[in-house]
């Protein structure tokens, strides 16, 4: 009797919780895999339908561009990922405000308490965004936060990783919070930035991968711009309105309103009022 996409998505979440199987929402495009009790049992066992039983798609003409996953019926799948993850977050105990927009599959590694993750209102998560917590790490995505494709936020130990209101992380940006990392309201990064509150220890005579870590908090103020490929290392503090030029390396304090550049980053000017 579950014929609409929202109730079918809820069914998938219920099946995952009951069986421990991982069922992606792509099954909603192949409802034959879950439309009867027998089909559900077969799907959970990993049997599915034999490829030979699936209808062969019609041949494409030479001027057509092949689609990797086949045609998508936009009307039936509109908002599907958002509804699926809203349900999934709720089932896992993750607080999530209204207006969540998820535009594709996410990477979720919840190795700590799920209740330590809070997602505000009107948050946008692009395909491949990666959320991870370990230990007692706490992750907070404020209202209006946007994570572009491949953006990765990781929090561990007893640290707090907080993205304030309207913070945007660009494609492939990584935030690693072994200690507290705070982004102030309206700050944003271009693509492939790294904000890293943890570094390997470097004792001689011992392989690097077997050594521990040093941690120090990072504070990024409001209205800060991180240019493409910028690196912010542990213990840094960046004042409100500062600009970190592309490929610069910040290790220490950056004054409010400063424009910095280089590795290590140095003040080259201040923004005009």
Image (cartoon, rainbow, N blue to C red):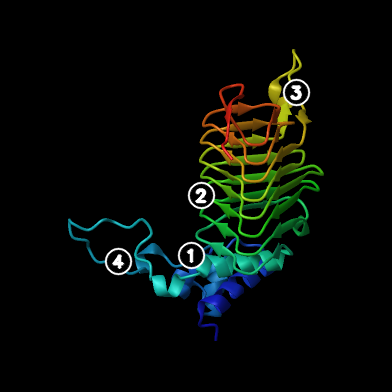
Q: What is the CA distance from the residue labelled 4 to the residue labelled 1? A: 19 Å
Q: Report how far apart the C-alphas of labels 2 and 3 lie in the structure.
A: 31 Å
- What residue is disc 4 on? 56
Q: Earlier in the sequence, mark 2 or mark 1?
A: 1
**Residue 167: image location, x then y, percent:** 61, 50
- Cα separation, mark 4 vs mark 2, equals 32 Å
Earlier in the chain: of badge 4 and badge 1, it is 1
Query: Contact, CB < 8 Å: mark 4 with mark 2?
Result: no
Above-or-below relation of 240 to 166:
above
Q: Which mark is residue 149?
A: 2
Examine the rendered structure and indicate whether residue 2 appears above or below residue 261: below
Which of labels 3 and 1 is toward the front?
A: 3
Other-residue count near label 2 (Cα within 10 Å), few / some / many at <14 / 14–19 / ≥20: many
Q: Earlier in the sequence, mark 3 or mark 1?
A: 1
Q: Residue at x 76, y 36 (%)?
A: 217
Q: Which quadrant is the C terminus positioned in?
A: top right
Q: Position of residue 86 (x, y in %)?
A: 62, 67
Of circles 2 and 1, the one toward us is: 2
Residue at left offset 50%, top offset 60%: 103
> Which of the two labelled residues, at mark 4 and mark 2, occupies the earlier sequence position?
4
Return the residue nearer the eye: 58 or 176: 176
Disc with the residue nearer the chain's start (4 vs 3)? 4
Disc number for residue 201:
3
């Amino acid at each position: 009797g579950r014929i609409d996409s929202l109730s079918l998505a809820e069914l998938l979440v219920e099946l995952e919780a009951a069986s421990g199987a991982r069922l992606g929402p792509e099954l909603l495009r192949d409802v034959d895999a879950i439309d009867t009790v027998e089909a559900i049992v077969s799907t959970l066992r990993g049997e599915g339908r034999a490829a030979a039983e699936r209808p062969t798609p019609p041949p494409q003409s030479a001027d057509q561009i092949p689609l990797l996953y086949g045609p998508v019926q936009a009307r039936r799948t509109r908002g599907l990922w958002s509804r699926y993850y809203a349900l999934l977050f709720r089932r896992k105990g993750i607080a999530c405000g209204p207006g969540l927009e998820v535009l594709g599959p996410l990477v979720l590694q919840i190795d700590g308490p799920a209740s330590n993750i809070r997602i505000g209102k009107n948050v946008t998560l692009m395909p491949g965004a990666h959320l991870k917590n370990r230990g007692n790490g706490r992750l907070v995505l404020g209202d209006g936060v946007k994570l572009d494709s491949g953006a990765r936020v990781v929090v561990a130990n007893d640290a707090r990783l907080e993205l304030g209101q309207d913070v945007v992380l660009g494609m492939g940006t990584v935030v690693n919070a072994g200690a507290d990392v705070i982004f102030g309201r309206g700050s944003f990064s271009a693509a492939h930035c790294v904000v890293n509150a943890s570094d390997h220890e470097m004792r001689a005579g011992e392989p690097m991968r077997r050594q521990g870590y040093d941690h120090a908090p990072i504070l990024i103020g409001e209205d800060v711009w991180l240019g493409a490929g910028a690196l912010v290392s542990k213990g840094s503090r960046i004042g409100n309105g500062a600009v970190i030029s592309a490929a610069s390396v910040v290790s220490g304090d950056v004054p409010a309103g400063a424009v910095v550049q280089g590795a290590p980053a140095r003040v080259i000017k201040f923004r005009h009022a």
